[in-house]
């Protein structure tokens, strides 16, 4: 697939700033976002892209790999790349890429949880199945059994939140919840926090059992706020 002749003062102008790979990633992502290549369309061969943007094939190859990871492109055996048709996968991969490259700030990630998870709990309370409710109950039982084993407690804690997010029937927010939990994992071990956390999970569970949407939202919000408070208390040194 050939490239059209370059046009001045548009997204196809020669690359001049940033590293060549970064600039090419930004330019190609912009072209895809603007609809220059429609979903499912095969993009030009790397030789054509290299000639058009006046960069080496290695730069093109690296940029295409980044765009593939981010979800903009999908690799085709022996054919190169085509524009991804999965908008939700593109969103999630881009979010993952942004968090991976940026500074992983505990407070910001927890604030994201505060926005997302109470809403998911509220939604789940009105539509959770009996099977999913039983799985939540099993998670709380596991948490009660592993109060003195922080790692196993956290596995049960994680499962509780993932099951609850899945019960909301919002696939994108479910995946975002999994992503946030994965990035926060290193900070979730807070000394002497298993018992208060168990109480809070029981409160969330009771609200969901009652199909109390407002109560589930409130209980989840309070739980995450308390996590943030406990984390701050442990990691703030006297005099800071």
Image (tube, rainbow, N blue to C red):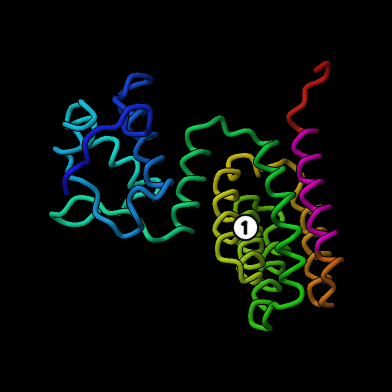
Residue 223 falls inside the magenta stretch? yes
Viewer-nearest residue: 117 or 240: 117
Q: Is residue 62 left or right of residue 31?
A: left
Name the spot of residue 198 as percent of width and height, x first: 77, 59
Identify the secondary structure beneath mark 1: helix
Residue beneath the point at 37% across and 27% down:
9
* Left or right of 208 on screen, residue 84: left
Horizontal placement of 12 versus 156: left or right?
left
Location of mark 1 (residue) = 158
**On the rendered structure, is 117 left or right of 203?**
left
Where residue 14 sits, quadrant-wise, is: top left
Residue 44 location in percent, x, y? 20, 46
Residue 188: quarter of image: top right
> Of residues 139 and 51, which is closer to you in this image?
51
What residue is rendered at 35% in x and 55% in y?
A: 38
Residue farthest toward the top in the current orientation of the protein: 239
Residue 129: percent from the left, percent from the top?
A: 67, 81
Magenta stretch, main secondary structure class:
helix
Residue 236 forms part of the magenta stretch: no
Q: Quadrant of residue 135?
A: bottom right
Q: Residue drawn 28% across and 57% down?
A: 41
Q: Which residues are magenta?
A: 217-232
User: Which quadrant does the C terminus fall into?
Assistant: top right
In the foreground, 75 or 18: 18
- Residue projecting furthest to the bottom: 130
- Residue neighbourhood size for the residue with mark 1, other residues' Cα within 10 Å, grouped as few (<14), some (14–19), many (≥20): some
């Amino acid at each position: 697939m050939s490239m059209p002749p370059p046009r001045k003062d548009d997204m196809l102008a020669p690359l001049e700033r940033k590293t060549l790979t970064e600039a090419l990633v930004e330019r190609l992502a912009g072209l895809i976002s603007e609809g220059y290549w429609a979903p499912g369309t095969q993009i030009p061969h790397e030789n054509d892209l290299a000639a058009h943007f006046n960069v080496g094939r290695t730069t093109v190859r690296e940029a295409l790999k980044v765009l593939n990871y981010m979800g903009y492109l999908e690799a085709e055996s022996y054919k190169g790349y085509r524009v991804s048709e999965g908008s939700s996968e593109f969103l999630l991969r881009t979010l993952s890429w942004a968090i991976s490259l940026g500074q992983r700030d505990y407070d910001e990630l927890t604030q994201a949880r505060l926005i997302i998870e109470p809403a998911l709990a509220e939604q789940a309370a009105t539509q959770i199945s009996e099977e999913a409710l039983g799985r939540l109950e099993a998670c709380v039982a596991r948490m009660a059994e592993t109060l003195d084993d922080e790692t196993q407690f956290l596995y049960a804690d994680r499962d509780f939140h993932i099951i609850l997010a899945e019960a909301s029937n919002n696939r994108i927010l479910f995946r975002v919840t999994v992503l946030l939990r994965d990035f926060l994992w290193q900070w979730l071990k807070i000394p002497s926090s298993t018992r208060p956390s168990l109480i809070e999970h029981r409160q969330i569970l009771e609200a969901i059992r009652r199909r109390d949407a407002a109560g589930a939202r409130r209980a989840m919000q309070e739980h995450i706020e308390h996590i943030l408070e406990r984390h701050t208390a442990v990691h703030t040194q006297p005099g800071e």
